[in-house]
């Protein structure tokens, strides 16, 4: 029977000299793998019809090759062309695709995760790489999987966030800890209260793209959400580490030493946050 679904391409790989393997996140069928026969042939009907981060309308059938379906037709609905030029945004898109591919169990229905990824890729394509966007979307992904870090109060004693200016974060205890509770958690690490407050705000207003974070807050959020993902999803993603590392501003280069009277070309020492 031929099935029809919307699907986002998560991974591509060669299947033979002329065919390709594609791992998709589909809206109704969850994660599915398809073989696209003849996709590499010069006159293939599939040429230009699929690529990483495209949302496509996919027709597929069968499951006789170790759980791999056969793609019958594929038409791109969203190509997200700016991701081909914005390499930092593309790195975060790769991270999100990797996160879904690894965290979502095979066979799980994933309508809400599909809508989450579709919207997250739209935002990266339209707005570029903002770490605030990534943290906001990570909180949304955790919510869809049933993991909600406690951020607005102490996860140990329930004390209000306002009473915990010297905060800590413990993945095993579920989130934020006050100074009294932190010593009892073996994996607690210090975290700036204002960074946790901002994460708590995004948790309640996931579509609020107006709030920005400082470089210090961003680094703290990267660490605590990374710890949380590692502990609860058992994931330590290299794609996440690389994307954040490359999003950080380059250190300002030392002023070159030149003989007196020599004109020195000016060098830009910082990267923009969005590209
Ligand atoms: Zn406490």
Image (cartoon, helix red, strand yellow):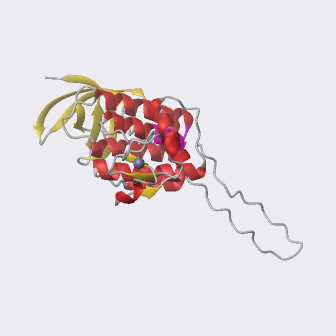
Is residue 167 on the magenta stretch?
Answer: no
Side (left or right) of 184 relative to 33: right
User: Residue 234: x percent and y percent?
Assistant: 28, 52
Q: Considering the whole magenta stretch, tell me its main secondary structure.
A: helix
Split into 4 quadrants, where in the image is the C terminus?
Answer: top right
User: Residue 102: x percent and y percent?
Assistant: 28, 46
Residue displayed at 46% across by 45% down: 92
Q: Which residues are magenta?
A: 128-136
Residue in front for this viewpoint, 230 or 92: 230
Is residue 130 on the magenta stretch?
Answer: yes
* Count of numbered circles on the image: 0
Give the residue at the far bottom of this rendering.
259
Give the residue at the far left of this rendering.
64
Side (left or right) of 223 relative to 34: right
Q: Quadrant of residue 41?
A: top left
Residue in front for this viewpoint, 59 or 107: 107
Residue in front for this viewpoint, 158 or 84: 158
User: Residue 27: x percent and y percent?
Assistant: 29, 27
Residue displayed at 45% across by 55% down: 242
Residue displayed at 48% across by 29% down: 205
Residue displayed at 19% across by 34% down: 70
Residue in front for this viewpoint, 269 or 87: 269
């Amino acid at each position: 029977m031929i099935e029809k679904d919307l699907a986002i391409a998560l991974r591509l790989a060669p299947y033979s000299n002329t065919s390709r393997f594609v791992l998709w996140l589909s809206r109704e069928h969850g994660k599915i793998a398809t073989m696209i026969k003849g996709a590499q042939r010069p006159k293939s009907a599939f040429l230009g019809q699929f690529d990483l981060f495209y949302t496509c309308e996919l027709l597929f059938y069968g499951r006789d090759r170790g759980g791999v379906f056969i793609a019958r037709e594929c038409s791109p609905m969203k190509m997200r062309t700016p991701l081909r030029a914005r390499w930092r945004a593309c790195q975060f898109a790769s991270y999100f695709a990797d996160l879904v591919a690894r965290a979502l169990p095979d066979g799980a229905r994933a309508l809400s995760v599909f809508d989450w990824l579709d919207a997250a890729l739209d935002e990266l394509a339209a707005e570029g790489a903002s770490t605030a966007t990534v943290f906001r979307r990570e909180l949304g992904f955790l919510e869809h999987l049933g993991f909600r870090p406690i951020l607005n109060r102490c996860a140990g004693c329930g004390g209000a966030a306002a009473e915990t200016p010297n905060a800590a974060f413990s993945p095993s205890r579920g989130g934020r800890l006050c100074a009294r509770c932190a010593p009892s958690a073996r994996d607690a690490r210090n975290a700036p209260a204002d960074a946790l407050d901002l994460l708590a705000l995004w948790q309640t207003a996931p579509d609020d793209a107006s709030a920005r974070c400082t470089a210090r807050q961003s680094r703290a959020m990267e660490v605590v959400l990374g710890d949380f993902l590692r502990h609860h999803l058992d994931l330590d993603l290299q794609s996440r580490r690389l994307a954040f590392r490359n999003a950080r501003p380059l250190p300002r280069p030392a002023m070159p030493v030149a003989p007196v009277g020599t004109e020195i070309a000016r060098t830009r020492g910082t990267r923009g946050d969005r590209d």
